[in-house]
């Protein structure tokens, strides 16, 4: 017989995690709090990331700068015969090919033997290379006006007397 009441303890009640328990337990509250804190901390991290990337749209992206720095430093350390030209920096790689790193419009590109178009950096306003005895210095100004500098030191073999015993 139907008396107008619904059975809240029956199997159709899915709101309670523990069917034997009546009411809201401390364990339910801690579980809900943990999920809430995970969601909030994820949102704060995402919002701070979006804010930092959208502040200066004409600036270099941090990951792009890091990748450029690592790639160019690695290649310069293995190369020889450095020369600064009006186009940019030229050097000979270990495969004895002439490599040019130069500015082209608003980006920095890499060419091998004057051919190809490998984009290394975007949003670049100016590019300057200096070859010194200790290494190579690349100075870059982004389209937003922020200055970046990459110094790569060249390690040469010690060519002194042989001290073998």
Image (tube, helix red, strand yellow):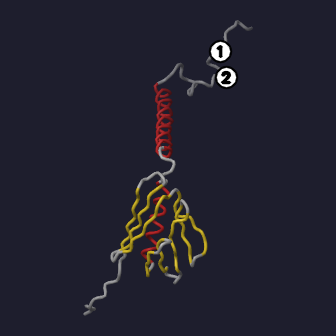
Furthest residue in direction right, as rendered? 1
Q: Specify which label sits upstream in the sequence, 1 or 2.
A: 1
Quarter occupied by the N terminus: top right
Q: Where residue 9 appears, x then y in whole percent? A: 61, 18
**Residue 103 in the image: x percent, y percent?**
51, 66
Query: What residue does disc 2 label?
Result: 12
Q: Secondary structure at mark 1?
A: loop
Looking at the picture, how far across and down is residue 134, in whole percent?
33, 75
Rendered location of residue 94, percent (x, y): 49, 81
Above or below residue 135? Residue 140 is: above
Residue under the image location 46 percent in, 75 percent down = 85
Q: CA distance from mark 1 to mark 2?
A: 9 Å
Task: In this rendered view, identify the residue nearer to me: 150 or 75.
Answer: 150
Residue sitting at 48 percent across and 67 percent down?
A: 71
In this view, which residue lies farthest toward the top? 3
Tell me, yes or no, whether the two marked residues, 1 and 2, touch with CB atoms within 8 Å: yes
Most foreground residue, 33 or 20: 33
């Amino acid at each position: 017989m139907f008396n107008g009441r619904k059975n809240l303890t029956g199997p159709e009640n899915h709101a309670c995690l523990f069917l034997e328990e009546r009411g809201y337990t401390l364990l339910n509250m801690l579980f809900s709090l943990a999920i809430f804190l995970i969601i909030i901390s994820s949102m704060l991290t995402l919002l701070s990331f979006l804010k930092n990337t959208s502040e200066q749209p004409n600036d270099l992206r941090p990951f792009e700068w890091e990748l450029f720095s690592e790639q160019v430093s690695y290649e310069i350390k293995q190369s020889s015969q450095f020369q600064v030209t009006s186009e940019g920096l030229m050097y000979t790689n270990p495969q004895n090919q002439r490599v040019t790193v130069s500015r082209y419009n608003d980006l920095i590109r890499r060419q091998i033997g004057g051919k190809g178009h490998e984009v290394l950096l975007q949003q670049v306003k100016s590019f300057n290379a200096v070859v010194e005895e200790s290494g190579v210095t690349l100075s870059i100004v982004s389209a937003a006006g922020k200055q970046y500098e990459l110094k790569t030191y060249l390690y040469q073999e010690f060519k002194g007397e042989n001290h073998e015993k």
